[in-house]
Image: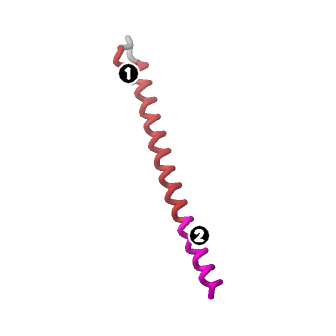
């Protein structure tokens, strides 16, 4: 009986661990995608600003 309980507990913890790992991986991927999107938007803004002549002081604000 003890072995059966130990096996059930082991598999339960294993499944919960896998589900938590998948969830953490999805969240990390979502954050990375958002960060890359923001960087791409900033690069597009820099390209637009770089195309202007003459450069203005407000273009260099962070």
Q: Quick one: 51 or 31, which is closer to the camera? A: 31
Which x, y percent locates residue 26? 50, 55
Q: Which residues are magenta?
A: 1-18
Q: CA distance from mark 2 to mark 1?
A: 50 Å
Q: Residue furthest right?
A: 3
Q: Residue furthest top?
A: 54
Q: Dot 1, crowdedness within 10 Å: few (<14), some or many (≥20)?
A: few
Q: How is the image coloured?
A: secondary structure
For residue 10, above or below residue 2? above
Q: Is residue 12 left or right of residue 53?
A: right
**For mark 2, what is the residue?**
14
Which x, y percent locates residue 16? 53, 68
Q: Quick one: 34 or 53, which is closer to the camera? A: 34
Which x, y percent locates residue 60? 40, 19
Q: Quadrant of the C terminus?
A: top left
Q: Quadrant of the N terminus?
A: bottom right
Q: Quick one: 46 or 24, which is closer to the camera? A: 24
Specify the principal SS of the magenta part. Answer: helix
Q: Residue furthest front?
A: 2
Q: Are marks 2 and 1 in contact (CB under 8 Å)?
A: no
Foreground disc of the pair 2, 1: 2
For residue 17, above or below residue 35? below
Q: Secondary structure at mark 1?
A: loop
Mark closest to the chain's N terminus, 2 or 1: 2
**For mark 1, what is the residue?**
61
Q: Dot 2, crowdedness within 10 Å: few (<14), some or many (≥20)?
A: few
> Residue at the location (43% across, 29% down)?
44
Is 13 in the magenta? yes
Is 43 in the magenta? no
């Amino acid at each position: 009986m003890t072995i059966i309980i130990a096996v059930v507990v082991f598999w339960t913890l294993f499944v919960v661990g896998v589900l938590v790992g998948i969830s953490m991986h999805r969240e990390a991927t979502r954050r990375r995608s958002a960060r890359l999107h923001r960087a791409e938007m900033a690069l597009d803004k820099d390209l637009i600003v770089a195309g202007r002549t003459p450069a203005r002081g407000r273009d260099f604000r962070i």
